[in-house]
Image: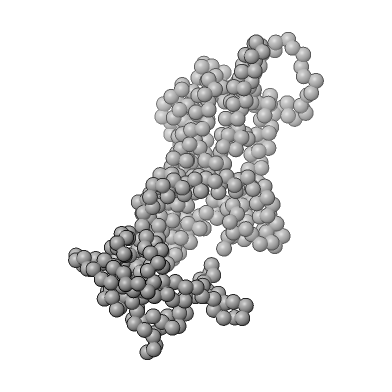
């Protein structure tokens, strides 16, 4: 299969995974909502015109034309219009356009919810049930992302130097850059010890090895000392003795090029050397390592979101002003698709490595959905959760002050802010997409 087809396949598979992530997120909202008796009228993947839909029971399920999210429609997201209790209106009045938007939202809410018993309204639920419903979506992304990362790291594994010998060097080369032998070079410790290509090192100085990093520290300690090494050759265990030597090797930069000092001479550092080239392998990570990686990704995502205003400004400057784009900054779904395509078409990775990388990318997206949706701003899930927590505090204050509770917090008053937030989110999405087209991350 040629590189172009592999690139397209990588993008398509990622889009399927994104669709699954959105579907799971919305399921996390819908399942508890139905369990609590809320009438869920729609479960949709995407936005815009409907491509395909079908009805099952009370709910219409379907796919929309723009695959940039999804939603469920619950009856009674806003409470009923407050009853006039004869109190004087507040002296602070919102602008007319604000009041008009609020009235329109109330009318739409009344039209949709009017014939439905109030006990089936979302806003009529106890606060803890509302919190469970709104947290359900992000929580499912956290679970899905964790499962994907477990499959990538714990089942498939990560590239590492295994303990199988791919090549035995004949000498300790004096030219560490070309790594070629000349007559004056001494015989390598591995060749002297009788280590052969295909051997798998089981232990070094009595220390068991499943990956080379298990014994690399011990190699340093045993330089110049005869040390027992046990290898598996075919189906037989062979005991050998090897004496590692200290060898100066070049220092390479991030691009893989040898580094030079101020005088232009190659920079080197001492490393233990026995004269073998190892076969790369995929080694599973431990549960502790996977949990640590999940925590690191969640922390990194949270820090990126905190820095998002500055990142947006930097990206806008790089896109429209000719600046340099931050390689570690946010990307759009288009940018993530490009990365997935590049991974899928990379000739340097085998199938297992490509699959693991794809799962890791999708896991990162789910962690981003988890963190981002917890931002306490409407229309995000965190905004609804913040409103429910605010209501619980207000109820407690009313109880302490022995005042009559007048009903749920009226979120319709924040509808204009919700619209404004939607515009901001759409603006950021369009900027990210445009940046990924004009100045993609290298």
Q: How many marks?
A: 0
Q: Is residue 91 left or right of residue 363?
A: right
**Residue nearest the viewer, comparing 108 with 86:** 86
User: Visible in this render: residue 148?
Assistant: no
Q: Look at the image and tell me in which quarter the C terminus lies.
A: bottom right
Q: Identify the image quadrant of the N terminus.
A: bottom left
When the figure is inspected, residue 338 is found, relative to residue 423, above or below; the finding is below
In the rendered image, is residue 278 in sight? Answer: yes
Q: Position of residue 183 (x, y in %)?
A: 37, 89
Task: Please determine whether, in this image, residue 398 is positioned above or below residue 363.
Answer: above
Outermost left residue = 236
User: Which colouring convention does the figure follow?
Assistant: one colour
* Residue 112: quadrant of the picture: top right
Left or right: 434 as drawn, with respect to 356:
right
Residue projecting furthest to the front? 225
Seen in the picture, residue 134 relative to 210 is either above or below; the reply is above
Picture quadrant of residue 399: top right
Identify the residue shown where x is 52% and y is 24%: 128
Q: Residue at x 68, y 50 (%)?
A: 310
**Which residue is nearer to you in this view: 73 or 366?**
366
Q: Residue at x 57, y 77 (%)?
A: 260
Residue 321: horizontal and vertical position, in percent?
72, 60
**Measured along the vertical axis of the image, is residue 259 above or below residue 148?**
below
Residue 231 position, x and y percent, is 26, 67
Nearer the observer, 177 or 50: 177
Residue at 55%, 55% (x, y): give it: 335
> Where residue 79 sits in the image (x, y, percent)?
60, 21
Residue farthest to the bottom?
183
């Amino acid at each position: 299969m040629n590189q172009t087809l592999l690139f397209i396949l990588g993008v398509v598979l990622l889009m399927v995974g994104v669709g699954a992530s959105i579907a799971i997120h919305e399921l996390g909202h819908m399942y508890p909502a139905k369990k609590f008796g809320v009438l869920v009228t729609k479960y949709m993947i995407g936005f815009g015109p409907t491509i395909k839909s079908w009805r099952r029971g009370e709910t219409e399920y379907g796919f929309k034309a723009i695959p940039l999210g999804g939603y469920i429609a619950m009856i009674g997201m806003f409470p009923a219009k407050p009853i006039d209790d004869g109190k004087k209106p507040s002296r602070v009045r919102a602008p007319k356009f604000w009041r008009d938007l609020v009235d329109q939202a109330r009318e739409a809410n009344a039209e949709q919810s009017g014939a439905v018993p109030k006990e089936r309204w979302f806003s009529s639920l106890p606060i803890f049930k509302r919190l469970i419903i709104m947290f359900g979506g992000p929580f499912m992304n956290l679970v899905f992302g964790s499962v994907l990362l477990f499959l990538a790291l714990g089942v498939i594994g990560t590239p590492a130097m295994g303990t199988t010998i791919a090549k035995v060097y004949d000498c300790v080369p004096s030219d560490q850059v070309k790594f070629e032998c000349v007559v004056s070079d001494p015989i390598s410790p591995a060749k002297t010890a009788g280590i052969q290509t295909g051997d798998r090192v089981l232990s070094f100085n009595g220390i068991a090895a499943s990956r080379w990093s298990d014994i690399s520290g011990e190699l340093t300690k045993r330089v110049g000392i005869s040390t027992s090494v046990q290898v598996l050759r075919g189906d037989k265990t062979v005991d050998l003795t090897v004496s590692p030597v200290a060898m100066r090797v070049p220092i390479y930069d991030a691009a893989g090029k040898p580094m030079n000092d101020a005088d232009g001479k190659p920079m080197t550092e001492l490393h233990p050397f026995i004269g073998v080239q190892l076969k790369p392998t995929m080694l599973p990570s431990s549960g502790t390592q996977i949990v640590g990686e999940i925590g690191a990704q969640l922390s990194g995502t949270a820090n990126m979101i905190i820095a998002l205003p500055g990142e947006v400004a930097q990206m806008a400057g790089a896109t429209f002003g000719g600046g340099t784009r931050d390689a570690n900054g946010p990307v759009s779904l288009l940018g993530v698709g490009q990365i997935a395509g590049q991974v899928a078409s990379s000739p340097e990775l085998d199938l297992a490595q490509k699959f693991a990388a794809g799962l890791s990318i999708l896991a990162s997206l789910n962690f981003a959905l988890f963190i981002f949706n917890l931002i306490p701003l409407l229309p995000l899930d965190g905004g609804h959760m913040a409103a429910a927590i605010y209501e619980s505090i207000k109820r407690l204050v009313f109880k302490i002050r022995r005042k009559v509770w007048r009903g749920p917090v009226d979120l319709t008053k924040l509808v204009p802010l919700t619209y404004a937030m939607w515009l901001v989110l759409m603006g950021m999405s369009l900027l990210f997409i445009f940046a990924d087209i004009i100045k993609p991350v290298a």
